[in-house]
Amino acid sequence: MRYRVRHLTEYLYGAPVTLCYNMAHLLPRDTHNQRCLSRRIAVTPTPVYQTEGVDYFGNPTFYFSVQEPHKKLAIDVECYFEIEQNDLSNQLTLHDLSCAELRALIQASQSPELRMVKEYTLDSVHIHRSKELGEYARRCFTDDTPVLQACMDFTHQIFEEFTFDPAATSVSTPPEQVLKDKRGVCQDFAHLAIACIRSLGLPARYMSGYLETLPPPGQEKLVGADASHAWFAVFIPDLGWVEFDPTNDLMPNEQHIVTAWGRDYADVTPLQGVIFDGGDSQALNVSVDVQRV
Amino acid sequence: MTESTIAKLAAQDQAPLTAPYVAPDRAYDEAFSETRQPRLPWQPVMSAVHQLGTEGMQDRHLRAQRILRDDGATYNLKSDPLSPNVWSLDIIPNVIDKSEWLNLETALKQRAHLFDLIYKDLYGEQRLLKEGVLPSEIVFSHPGFLRQCHGMHWPSETALTFHAVDLVRDQSGQFIATGDRTQAPSGAGYALENRTVVSRVLPSLFRDSQTMRLAGFFQTVRETLSQLASDLTDSPRIVVLTPGAYSSTYFEQAYLANHLGYPLVQGGDLTVRNGKVWMKSLNGLSRVDVILRRVEDAYCDQAELRSDSTLGVPGLLEVARQGNVIIANPLGTGLLETPALLAFLPQISQTLLDEPLLLPSVTSYWCGEQEHLAYVLNNLHQLIIKPAFRSIDNKSIYCHQLDEKALSEVRAKILADPVAYVAQDYIPGSVTPVWDNGEMLARPCILRTFSVANESGYCVMPGGLSRVAESTAEAIVSKNLSGSRSKDMWVLSDTTETDIDVPLDNLPISQAQVANLPSRVIENLFWFGRYAERAEMSLRLMRTIFKQLNGIDHFPIESREVLLGAMSEISGSQPGFIEQPELLMQPNDELAALVSDGQRVGSIKSNLQLMLACAEQVKEMLSADTRIILNELRDHIHSVDRAYVNGLPAVPEESLDGLVTSLLAISGLNHESMLRGMDWMFQEIGRRTERALLTANLLKTTLSKPLPSLQQQQVLESVLLSVEALISFRRRYRTRARVSYGLDLLMIDRSNPRSLIYQVDQLRKYLEELPQSDQVSLGLSREKRLIIKSLNDIQLADLESLAQIEESTQTRAQLTELMGQVIEQLEQLTTIISDKYFDHTAGPQQLIKAKWKNNV
């Protein structure tokens, strides 16, 4: 499948910003089943300094600094992708590594790969393991359950028990709060799932990207209606990182486009940085279009 | 063992060559052998101590304290800016012989090299983690593992420029490392200061001792820092980045910056533009190539690291990652300070160096490993528990001091999060003699050594910073450098060392360049001048008022009203005598407050405090003599405090004289000893502006209102007295106290350095000297127009008309108007200068700025 993604981010400031430094995770990465065919990024006003790089997790980064006064900052990203089928649903019934076995493997960390995967079993900026979080996932992750099946069950559990509600949370709402309120957005569900799984001693990471949404039958797709999306992945030794989307109750196949992964949102924040001046008010507009081409 | 069980014997009563104390059991004695004889290298020291005797030693001790205070070797200014704590130094040096030292040096070089490799591995290939040599949780859980530093550019093969190690000696005398400092190691500057002081108070001992010099080490520091930017430029600009005057080791940072010849800057003095780092200076932005940093990793860049930092330079990390600035030590090195590393160091050495580790570390256990945890839980009572990840509130727990209940709490704490704890064996450490109130006592000591990268690896400072605990029972030396007494460390050579000649030709050009000053420094000097002047003017008027109040002459209400009102006006301290006329006949409390209430805005004490705070901000710019005078000023402030403790004293002006003298000494020193650079210029501009403003204000408030002739004479003479012009006035005009004569002397007499015109004329000259922007401007600049206008306004004034009383208002309206106009123009001038030359972006200096604004 081929896609074109257009991601427009606009900041509007109450007073002119005289100087800004920003680190962006907006450029998509290549994965085992995803290839970026072309990409373009344009910032207005034109940055006096910009570089592309690769971060610790292998994600592409884009760093820029604008030094002229501006009341509006726009970052316009356009990319073309090719994504191959990555259907692991058949593994759900076949793969029999149990939760207890995976936990033991991680604990023993007998291979370089497992030692490095440990990074995703520990606390990170937004995610702190706890008994309570572990309890919430325990009925899916019993010792004998195959871990893949457990992850899918747990994805389903979150999907069923939580309400999608953009008003309920902010960027920094902790998973404990989300668990209490049972409301949130894709980022919250991903963080919650990761936090619960790590609390049980298993490795999970945060996936950031886009999702192609299809309009209801008979209706035309609206421009800018798509959104950036977040989900999670669990490490299974012979399969690698297997992805789950608790917001949509499914295993991503070819409709999920990956821009970056990390331990949590803080590692892959789409745009972070500081501004000088700019007054008290800031407004942010984001529009995303994912189109098949 | 407690203090009392140690036999204490006065040094002078003993034969010189036996130990005057009994060292605690199990402890290695640095100075004395088992037979209580001084070890060979210590013999000269011991006989010197003996020869000096108690009095001599006490005298040397006091001299050392005085030198330290005059050098500004202080710390912890937060507690009380008026009585800063003075760095504590014991004058008996610690001595080690060269052959023993060389063994240690080899081991320290290897260790520095090893830590460099560990840094590069953890931020690069991560072999140590992949191969399981170092458990990956230690790194992955560490908040100091800055993933943002991935892909960092390293300028040369060696990434870790500085490495410091804390050492103790075990019972056998073997050195053992208890911790490594890899982020922004402090202490080398204190070691240098200690050496300077001890060699001054024990000159002959030092001269005859063949002690290895420290100069070579600091020369290597200079060469290495210059070399770091060799890819960027041939004449690198190097700065020292400090967290600021409230940092506990600020003295050392200022001292090092001066010794090495680099500007001392704060985060707000630097800015990132066009992908490079620049210093905001008087001449605009100037490029920075190398940063010797004393700010911790996480606080260095608000854009990518801690956004709540007030100490960093936004965008710095990206510039460093691209190699467009070199930071020493590089960002991310805080990770290597985790004590968890020590538990795995021998294997790490085998893996990365393929060599056995030469310097043993204190036996350490990381509780994240099952067997280690089990051992720790079973042997808790003899271990020290340390946090694996350094944080402010986590202190080391010395379990041998705890009871069962406390131990079980520690156990529970570890079990809740074993990964976060490291246990270490408790090593009592060696003891060394210290001079303590007339006797020699044994005190446990630790040594910090310093290494700097050079072309062939690492160069180790021949010496170090030795620190002692305050009692033998507590073999615990504070982690905080300034929290304990220190000692100089002498490495005795068997041959006389020729002094190291610093070949001047080899000095990189940057060191010959004229130092360009950060805007913040200029701004602080400007305010230093203003506060000094403000304090002095208030003091002078205050003294005059006291003389009138206690004088033999009658002090009628009209004169009181004018002079006390002027005091309120000049100090700007509201509410004052003007708003509260009932105070005029009972002025004592208000006057006492205006002198000694440091909380009262505008009081003499608060102006002096602000002046001292500015001086602290520019510590590195002050001459040794200035520091001595500032110390005297502090002492005088304390005597004023004592004199005013119960309100206005009987002879209130007496204690003020010292303050005036100190302030005069400072301005005299500036005139006679300071180079006419921009630092001098701005201090002078501050001084002149303030004196002009206050003089105009004084004339306006005291002379505008017509008074009966006796009162008029009293007021005029008081004003003249307060500006030291009464004698000249009397000589010139005898006793004819006419207002116009007074104006002649105070306003337009160019030969009077306290006249208004003198100040304005000087300001005009200084403005000519200030750097101008490159932009071509038509005609005179605004500030020049203002100053010429003020000059003309004053020159063209007709003194007789100024002294004329206007019918309708019954005031000297022309005088009021003219002074008002001059004040307004001068205030505009300061605003322009401030906008043009000082930095106004929000930064670490924000707080103090706000205070100033309230005060203007």
Image (cartoon, rainbow, N blue to C red):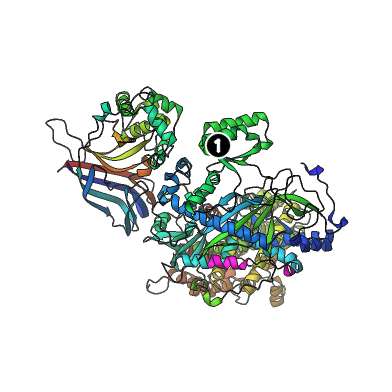
| Image location of residue B491, percent across then percent down | 68, 62
Residue, far right: B13
Name the residue nearer the viewer: B728 or B297.
B297
Q: Is residue B710 visible?
A: no
Quarter of the image containing the N terminus of chain B? top right
| Image location of residue B159, percent across then percent down | 47, 58
Q: Is residue B483 visible?
A: yes
Callout 1 amino acid: His
Quarter of the image containing the C terminus of chain B? bottom right
- Which stretch did the figure color magenta? B206-222
Residue, far left: A218
Picture layout, residue B219 above or below residue A46: below
Picture layout, residue B19 above or below residue B754: above
Query: In the shown orientation, is residue A258 left or right of residue B503?
Result: left
Q: Which residue in the structure is indicated by mark 1?
A: B372
Snapshot quadrant of residue A69: bottom left
Name the residue at 65% across, 54% down: B447
Query: In the shown orientation, is residue B249 left or right of residue B319?
Result: right
